[in-house]
Image (cartoon, grey):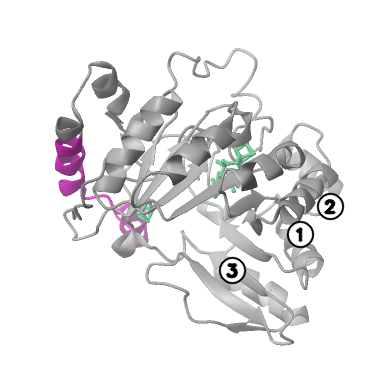
Amino acid sequence: MTEQSQAIKDQFGRPLKDLRISVIDQCNFRCTYCMPADIFGADYPFLNKEEMLTFDEIIRTAEVFASLGVEKIRLTGGEPLLRKNLHLLIERLFSINGIEDIALTTNGVFLPKYAMLLKEAGLKRVNLSLDAIDDEVFQSINSRGVKTSPVLKGIEAAEEAGLQVKVNMVVKRGMNESQILPMARFFKGKGHILRFIEFMDVGNVNGWENSEVVSKQEIINTITEELPLKQLAPNYYGEVATRYRYKDGDGEIGVISSVTDHFCDTCTRARLSADGKLYHCLFASQGYDIRKLLRQGITDNMFKLEVMKKWSTRGDRYSADRAEGKLPIKEKIEMSYIGG
Ligand code: SAM
Ligand code: SF4
Ligand code: SF4
């Protein structure tokens, strides 16, 4: 698709700028807050190969989105590195007109195997999830007995391949708030930005309670008692992480406070599930079936019109509604299905 990108706006005047693509709904971990092992067991109906979008279908979708203003793509899952030949998809995504940035969110375990291929495919950065630096705490979270060393090796492999690394830690009370300081100490001075994420009420299976949210303020207070911090200005409009620098100059951290703050006013993100459903919000209930359109042989122009029509009716602002006490009670999609 070579024509100029056509900016479109939703009901609140928000443009479509980012596309998050989940490439698989399966994962090698069973993080208790994301894919509880008792629910995501051996008989869980994960998507089969035919149900998932092919690379050709993903590329066609990305081309249409790029023609409507999308500049940034994030690949996620499930665990995206479980999708075979992901590097080939990345290479093709980079060749799309208008796509300026591609990122990957991963639990890092497969990076020693794939980091170099990903880098050669054009990837520049990865967000790596690690919720504890203590083996026992980490093992009790991932429910697969995986110690921290495979993830730390993943970080090393990414570094060696020349990828920029950000480390993400979800903080949930009763699960890992004891790890806030040890994680800060461990990553301070190592050149990676560590970002703490408030535990969110995504999906239905993780039994989210407001009391389990460790707020941005609490996280910052905990760190600053030992390692004083100074808040920094955002890097760009709509940045979701609040940035802080250690006062001794030895590194930066971020906090993503999706519960105690909200970012709906500047949310420019659309999400595509591995089976081709389009969602306009992380907390959506229903997706729009893109796979069906593609497999029915829709033309590029009609496809574009459909996406434009949908985006122009977008009125999602779940976190803002939550903050205003107007929380709708509804079934929501799961994080492992739609990605972070
Ligand atoms: N498997 C990959 C990983 O863990 O990085 C990619 C998919 S995972 C769903 C994406 C991110 O969502 C991870 O950083 C994970 O910790 C985060 N996440 C999952 N459930 C969450 C929740 N309820 N609240 C906040 N973050 C969550
Ligand atoms: Fe898997 Fe990522 Fe969810 Fe953990 S957070 S279960 S690694 S998809
Ligand atoms: Fe965007 Fe929905 Fe999150 Fe608001 S709640 S920032 S609309 S994904």
Q: Residues within 10 Å of mark 2 (few under 14, many from 20)?
A: some
Which residue is labeled 1 in the image?
A: 179
Count residues near mark 3 (Cα–Cα under 10 Å), then give few for <14, some for 14-19, many for 20+. Answer: many
For residue 200, above or below residue 89: below
Which residue bears the numbered disc 3?
Answer: 254
What residue is at 29 percent from the left and 28 percent from the top?
290
**Closest to the observer: 153 or 261?**
153
Residue at (43, 16) in percent of width and height: 51
Question: Main SS of the magenta segment?
Answer: helix
Q: Which type of secondary structure does the marked residue at label 3 adopt?
A: strand
Q: Are marks 3 and 1 in contact (CB under 8 Å)?
A: no
Image quadrant assignment for residue 325: bottom left
Dividing the image into four quarters, tell me where ligand 2 lies.
top right
Report the amino acid beneath label 1: Gln
Instruction: Write down the region rendered in magenta.
Output: 304-326
Say which quadrant the N terminus sits in: top left
The residue where tag 2 is placed is 134
Task: Indicate left or right for 63 with 247 as reference.
Answer: left
In the rendered structure, does residue 68 fall within the stretch colored magenta?
no
Q: Amino acid at mark 2?
A: Asp
Q: Is residue 171 above or below residue 303?
A: below
Q: Earlier in the sequence, mark 3 or mark 2?
A: 2
Separation (CA) of disc 3 from disc 1: 15 Å
Label pair 2/1, CB-CB below 8 angstroms: yes
